[in-house]
Amino acid sequence: MATAAVNITDRAKRYRAQNAIEQEDRICVFCGAQSGLMVGHVNGNESDGEPANLVYTCRSCNASIGIFMARAGFGKRTTQYNPEGGARSVGQWLVAVTSMKGAGPMKLADAVAMVRATSPAKRSEYARDIWRTRRRRGTDKVGVPF
């Protein structure tokens, strides 16, 4: 039985869209660029994964078209779905991330699951905390280990 589209992660929706696209040439349909491509949604509805609604766009055109459509009141952004759980502190977050880099104590699968389950708002909060600490320590410069 297929998982309902409302109960899958935004990454899974992008994966499904990548595999459903019917466009033969991998070029941006708006400017013809051949690199930095992603799936764009013709009607602006990111939850509409029907093959006829999917085209390749470069990142620049995708962003520009998305902004235009949002201002015009068209389309619908994907709501990110994250399962319950995730890192409950910046310490847990750092352990998971360093484990993903091969330098932490967690198994890779467990670290990936924790990162995926952490909401975007919490990820941003942890990033702000980390950079605040790095600036305070003076380790926020390029090439300086934290």
Image: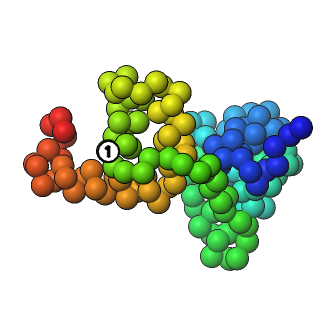
Residue 135 seen in the current view: yes
Taking the image as shown, residue 52 lies to the left or right of residue 72, namely right
Q: Position of residue 5 (x, y in %)?
A: 79, 50
Q: Which residue is mark 1?
A: 91
Q: Quadrant of the N terminus?
A: top right
Q: Amino acid at mark 1?
A: Gly
Q: Position of residue 32 (x, y in %)?
A: 64, 43
Taking the image as shown, residue 18 lies to the left or right of residue 61, namely right
Residue 101 seen in the current view: no
Are there few (<14), some (14-19), or many (20+) residues within 10 Å of tag 1? few
Q: Position of residue 58 (x, y in %)?
A: 59, 46
Tell me the residue at 46%/24% (across/down): 107
Tell me the residue at 19%/52% (across/down): 133
Q: Position of residue 108 (x, y in %)?
A: 48, 25
Tell me the residue at 71%/66% (across/down): 76
Tell me the residue at 44%/47% (across/down): 87
Q: In the image shown, does 58 or 137 lie closer to the viewer?
A: 137
Q: Residue furthest left?
A: 138
Q: Quadrant of the C terminus?
A: top left
113 to 101, vertically: above or below: below
